[in-house]
Amino acid sequence: MSALINVAAGFVATIVTAPVIAFFIVYYAVKKTGKAHKTAFKRAVDFTVLLFMLSVYFIVLETWGLPIGWWILLGLLITAVMFTIYHWRHYDDIDLFRLVRGVWRMQFIIYFSLYWILVLAGFYLHMSS
């Protein structure tokens, strides 16, 4: 039982520290079910947003010792408010599912970018010290 727990913990740690791997696993799994490229990409985005958020949180925590959980929640809330205002002004009514999906995918763009910026910054800091 202990070996199974260690394997599971190692798998989870790998996925959290390397969400790009998880992205490609989900993408190829959905693609193999016969879905189109666009659908597979969207599903991979939807399933890995939380992993990118966690990775950014832990990279910042380990690199600079800053717990940024509240900043992540605040950024999510601000994005949701901005999208809600946009939908309110440009559409007849607010489609909640479409709104949440848009906010969620915007978080992917934000945290995917932050992930790579932090990975590159970490490499630079490690190499320069």
Image (spheres, rainbow, N blue to C red):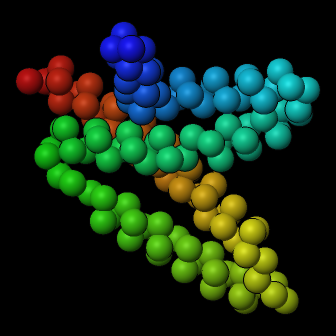
Q: At x 81% / y 87%, what residue is drawn? A: 93
108 and 67: which is toward the camera: 67
Q: Is residue 54 visible?
A: yes
**Residue sitting farthest toward the top:** 3
Which of these two is toward me, 94 or 113? 94
Residue nearest the observer in this picture, 114 or 12: 12
Q: Quadrant of the N terminus?
A: top left
Q: Residue at x 52, y 71 (%)?
A: 79
Can residue 14 be seen here? The reply is: no
Q: Is residue 87 above or below residue 49?
A: below
Considering only vertical position in the picture, is 84 above or below 125? below
**Residue 116, located in which quarter of the rendered image?**
top left
3 with respect to 96 (left or right)? left
Residue at image point 67% right, 37% down: 44
Q: Is residue 122 left or right of residue 82?
A: left
**Which residue is rendered at x = 63% and y = 85% of the image?**
85
Total marks in image? 0
* Viewer-proximal residue among 43 and 5: 5
User: For residue 56, which quarter of the picture?
Assistant: top left
Residue 62 location (% of width, % of height): 19, 38
Q: In screen coordinates, is 95 left or right of 114?
A: right
Q: Residue at the far left: name it.
A: 129
State which quarter of the image contains the C terminus.
top left
Reply above or below: 18 against 82. above
- Where residue 69 appears, x then y in whole percent? 30, 59
